[in-house]
Amino acid sequence: MLVSGGYNAGPLASAELYDPATGVWTTTGSLATGRYAHTATLLPSGKVLVGGGIDSGGNDLTSAELYDPSTGVWTTTGSLATGRYAHTATLLPSGKVLVGGGIDSGGNDLTSAELYDPATGLWAATGSLATGRDTHTSTLLPNGKVLVSGGSGTVGTLASAELYDPATGVWTTTGPLATGRYAHTATLLPNGKVLVSGGYNAGPLASAELFDPATGFWTATGSLATARYYHTATLLPDGKVLVNGDLT
């Protein structure tokens, strides 16, 4: 497992590797630019793409870097057209990476989206979201479309959700969440539905909802025992989902 960047009295450039076989962390090559609130995406080549984030001056970053596990070295790659942080990055079946939303250094929630092509190292604009949002979730569905849900926007906490179609580059609205939320999790289940849990809306949330791509609707499901946000959710081999860590 690769951990890169983050914040500790300032943006970090350091990176570390965790070996589950030994339970030991080791340092690896450092990023060229310290950053936090960025994204990290595993590419089909085995390299890891890091994009955007915030630098030591509080500026949004357009820069992107690639980590090569075979050498432990980071190299710069093409820059985003728009600096952003608190955005999402999703690996598409084509091998390209979709980046959407986030915030710029002016505090504006972004509707723009971009595609990174590992074959060229370049970013290209694609269709824009209907609603600017940050701290949302982005989930690749079995049909190849990408579901974006919730987040925070200029109007406050968002319940809206949108679908991105890689074949057309167009976003379309789908059914809204019953409860607006940000800093939540979204997990694709083996049955093709998406489980959203927790998040924040005037306080930490315990509620959870299921999105059905076949209908475009959300339905309530059992609530968490503990309300939480900025947590993690992991799909286990038996199909259950483990939620842990949080701000409460």
Image (spheres, rainbow, N blue to C red):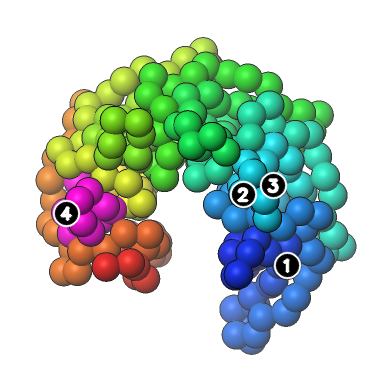
Q: Is residue 184 above or below residue 171?
A: below
Amino acid carrying label 2: it is Gly
Q: Nearer the viewer, residue 108 or 118?
A: 108
Dot 2 or dot 1: first in sequence order is 1
Q: Which mark is residue 207?
A: 4
> What residue do we see at 60% from left, 85% from top?
23
Q: Please, is residue 243 above or below residue 193 in the view?
A: below
The correct choice, above or below, for 95 with respect to 172 in the image is below
SS at mark 1 in the image = loop
Q: Residue at x 73, y 42 (%)?
A: 64
Specify the amino acid type for callout 4: Ser
Is the C-beta separation of discs 3 and 4 under 8 Å? no
In 3D space, how far apart are the residues under numbered discs 4 and 1 (Cα atoms)?
A: 36 Å
Disc on the earlier residue, 4 or 1: 1
State how far apart marks 3 and 4 are (Cα): 33 Å
- Segment tinted magenta in the rendering: 198-212
| Quadrant containing the N terminus in the rendered view | bottom right
Give the spatial CA distance, label 1 vs label 3. 15 Å
Q: Which residue is mark 2?
A: 58
| Residue that numbered label 1 is attached to | 14
Residue 195: say if magenta: no
Q: From the image, tell me which residue sits under label 3.
A: 49
Quarter of image, res 34 = bottom right
In which quadrant of the rendered image does the C terminus lie? bottom left
Between 40 and 36, the one nearer to me in the picture: 36
